[in-house]
Amino acid sequence: MSISAHDIARVLSEALPFMQRYDEATVVIKYGGHAMHDDHLARAFARDIVLLEQTAINPVVVHGGGPQIEAMLKKVGAPSHYTAGLRITDKPTLEIVEMVLAGSINKQMVGHINEAGGKAIGLCGKDGNMVVARKLTRTVVDPDSQIEKMIDLGFVGEPEKVDVTVLTQILGRELIPVLAPVAAAVNGGTFNVNADTFAGAIAGALKAKRLILLTDVPGVLDDSKNLIKQLSADEARRLIADGTISGGMIPKVETSIDALERGVEGVVILDGKVPHAVLLELFTELGAGTLIHN
């Protein structure tokens, strides 16, 4: 189906108020899931990020890489260890994680953005002590004894301190930071950090206007599996409590609430498999996912 020049001009005109809304604003985008493995979607995402920068928005990209890490572990013959469904990141695994996240994936994304006409800079949380993390532990309930026990996840951390000095030197200078969720430890070591959590901490420290979490689902769904377009933080907490929000969506929503408490204006959870999902969310009235706000 061809689109007329008149239709293109109308779309651009209708996007103007939204461009003005985000003029010189910081938007943090967590990129991961299926879209990262589809070369066409990855390149389209890169073009969209360059477009944001060209419209005077300051985009900050945080990426994941779980499947790529798993593939590399298999390639080098390194075993994967899990407890209660959670990956244990031992020292050999951490070396692979850092190599894949801060190396191959990060530079591939930087390359895509640069090919699209942007000026991307690849960084991780260790650069400039941007993110210093503490060891993360999890408790699980033993199904037989119903007793809670602590799980040692190894070199998995959660942000403790965030210093955005490096980012503030970059933003607003036609440069696009692309961040890998690898953080420094207080003792000088390294921690692997969940990409959603990492993005939330960065967005909070930057007081971003929007944090966008790209996932493999349309957003937060109600009991009938219909998309919930908007939620307040209190409504989101209630939906977690009554079981409407469950499984892997719980940590994403908890990250969203935490980011709001840190000063982010709004958090959007949306499907990264939808072409131009970020543009649809920011530059149209309909949006593309679930907006969580205070």
Image (spheres, rainbow, N blue to C red):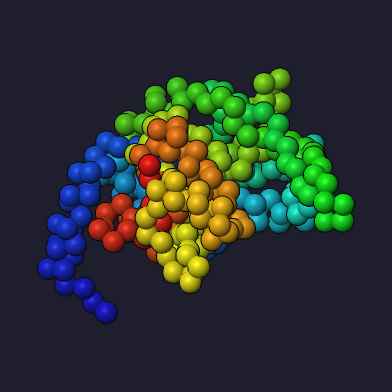
Residue 50: percent from left, percent from top: 35, 47
Q: Quadrant of residue 193?
A: top right
Q: Residue furthest top?
A: 187
Q: Nearer the viewer, residue 130 or 49?
A: 130
Q: Quadrant of residue 13?
A: bottom left
How many labels were placed on the picture? Answer: 0
Q: Is residue 252 above or below residue 119?
A: below
In this rendering, would 82 be left or right of 176? right
In this rendering, would 57 be left or right of 275? left
Which residue is at 82% across, 42% downward?
149
Which residue is at 56% across, 57% downward?
242
Whether residue 277 is visible to the viewer of this picture, yes or no, is no
Residue 177: percent from left, percent from top: 44, 37
Q: Nearer the viewer, residue 168 or 146?
A: 146
Residue 197: percent from left, percent from top: 56, 41
Residue 111: percent from left, percent from top: 48, 47
User: Which image quadrant: the C terminus?
Assistant: top left
Q: Nearer the viewer, residue 137 or 239?
A: 239
Which residue is at 67% across, 28% downward?
134
Which residue is at 25% across, 58% downward?
285
In this rendering, would 240 be left or right of 167? right
User: Which image quadrant: the N terminus?
Assistant: bottom left
Q: Residue furthest left?
A: 6
Whether residue 237 is visible to the viewer of this picture, yes or no, is yes
Q: Is residue 208 above or below residue 242?
A: above
Q: Residue furthest right?
A: 145
